[in-house]
Image (cartoon, rainbow, N blue to C red):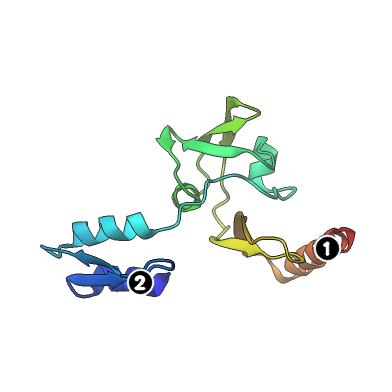
């Protein structure tokens, strides 16, 4: 995806997109070829995963604030959240500052205030799973947290064991 976005942002003024299931490519002519036009096209091509929480790790600011698995993050400090990228941008730009999230939970909007830790550096990437012939389906975004070596080893063993139990149960 990064190569595609790089091509949109810095490539020629005429772009061809081959789309699976289409005989003819989609041709886009960037008449003025200016950066705002290219940025708008790049944003339109960027996958938007709804910011719904999957696993919420014990001891982290999110769970201490009251966020739960299944919560859909709707707004942060009043700004609408369309994707995980928007959530992460907000968190990265708010170290040690309260962030008020409007959360959709059980059909109702609730407000939860989280204070992100300054030392956490997080990277998100969408994950997909294929299990024993089931169709491929999108999973919640994976959030990687930089931890000291000892904590990382403990977390790794815990997550591996949890994944092993889950896979052997299915």
User: Which part of the image, by quadrant, shows the C terminus?
Assistant: bottom right
Q: Nearer the viewer, mark 1 or mark 2?
A: 2
Q: Is residue 99 visible?
A: no
User: Which part of the image, by quadrant, shows the N terminus?
Assistant: bottom left
Residue closer to the observer: 25 or 68: 25
Mark 1, residue position: 167
Q: CA distance from mark 1 to mark 2?
A: 37 Å
Look at 77% across and 69% down and name the residue there: 150
Secondary element type, mark 2? loop
Secondary element type, mark 1? helix
Mark 2, residue position: 18
Residue 43 position by quadrant = bottom left
Q: Residues within 10 Å of mark 1 (few under 14, many from 20)?
A: few
Q: Is residue 7 left or right of residue 51?
A: left
Residue 96: x, y in percent? 53, 46
Q: Earlier in the sequence, mark 1 or mark 2?
A: 2
Residue occupying the far left of the picture: 32
Q: Is residue 117 above or below residue 115?
A: below
Q: Is residue 141 left or right of residue 42?
A: right
Look at 40% across and 36% down and name the residue there: 79
Look at 80% across and 62% down and name the residue there: 163
Q: Is residue 134 above or below residue 66?
A: below
Tally of numbered tags: 2
Residue closer to the observer: 120 or 163: 163
Look at 63% across and 38% down and name the residue there: 71
Residue occupying the far front of the picture: 23
Residue 137: x, y in percent? 63, 57
Q: Residues within 10 Å of mark 2 (few under 14, many from 20)?
A: few
Do tag 1 and tag 2 residues touch (Cβ < 8 Å)? no
Q: Is residue 165 left or right of residue 99?
A: right
Residue closer to the observer: 84 or 158: 84
Residue 110: x, y in percent? 59, 26
């Amino acid at each position: 995806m990064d190569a595609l976005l790089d091509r949109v942002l810095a490539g020629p003024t005429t772009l061809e997109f081959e789309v699976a299931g289409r005989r003819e490519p989609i041709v886009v002519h960037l008449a003025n070829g200016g950066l705002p036009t290219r940025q708008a096209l790049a944003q339109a091509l960027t996958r938007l995963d709804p910011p719904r929480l999957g696993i919420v790790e014990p001891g982290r600011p999110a769970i201490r604030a009251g966020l739960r698995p299944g919560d859909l993050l709707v707004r942060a400090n009043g700004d609408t959240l369309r994707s995980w990228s928007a959530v992460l941008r907000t968190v990265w730009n708010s170290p040690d500052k309260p962030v008020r999230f409007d959360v959709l939970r059980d059909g109702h909007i609730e407000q939860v205030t989280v204070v992100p830790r300054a030392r956490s550096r997080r990277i998100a990437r969408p994950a997909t799973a294929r299990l024993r012939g089931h169709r491929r389906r999108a999973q919640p975004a994976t959030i990687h947290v930089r931890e000291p070596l000892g904590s990382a080893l403990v977390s790794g063993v815990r997550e591996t064991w949890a994944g092993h139990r889950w896979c052997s149960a299915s």
